[in-house]
Image (tube, helix red, strand yellow):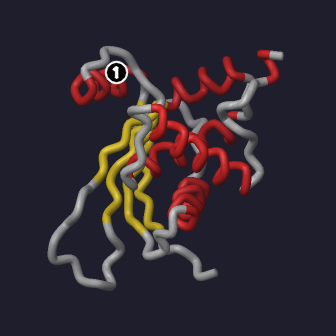
Amino acid sequence: MRKVNVQVDVQQAADETSALSSTDISRWVARVLEATGRNAGAELSVRIVNAAEMQQLNNEFRAKDMPTNVLSFPAGDIAGLPVDTVAPLGDLVICASVVADEAKAQGKRLDDHWAHMIVHGTLHLLGFDHENDDEAADMEGREIEILRTHGVANPYGESPQET
């Protein structure tokens, strides 16, 4: 299989340093592209933020006045790009403290939860959503399979703390 060309610009805007490395983020994005048959590659930005910045963005773009784990901003189609240009996929914004708190509360490895946020956000950039039961089942199934294929447990399954 040909290696998928992924270009990721990671902006570290939070004091928290628990995020995956740029290399690991690129690998997870490439895995999503491969799994969804989008082998042409992609370019995206990942901004890692604190809770205050995430709350402001979540309020501004989703009218939810609280921080969340990940927001996705798809680039959309850009007319006139040369055929050999890596297509801009969009931007992910991930709140480091929310991801860390969720991982701890759910009894998950922090790196695994970060991987899940990258997979989840990238699927959103590709047009997948979970606004209704059918969409949620499709998107969650894709997430579970991509993560499982690369050694990460089902993020929607029971955590060790729930047994």
Vertical side of 44 occupied by 153: above or below: above
Q: Amino acid at mark 1?
A: Gln
Identify which residue, 61 or 9, lies in the foreground. 61
Q: Position of residue 34 (x, y in %)?
A: 56, 67
Picture quadrant of residue 114: top right
Q: Is residue 162 left or right of residue 136?
A: right
Q: Residues within 10 Å of mark 1 (few under 14, many from 20)?
A: some
Asked if residue 83 shows in the view, the reply is yes
In percent of width and height, residue 145 lies at 66, 51
Q: Residue 131 falls in which quadrant of the image?
A: top left
What residue is shown with label 1? 55
Provide residue 107's location: percent of width, then percent of height: 74, 24
Seen from the viewer's position, the closer of residues 25 and 12 is 25
Residue at horizontal 31%, vertical 18%? 64
Judge from the rendering whether residue 51 lies leftward or rightward of residue 118; answer left or right.
left
Residue drawn 31% across and 45% down?
Answer: 73
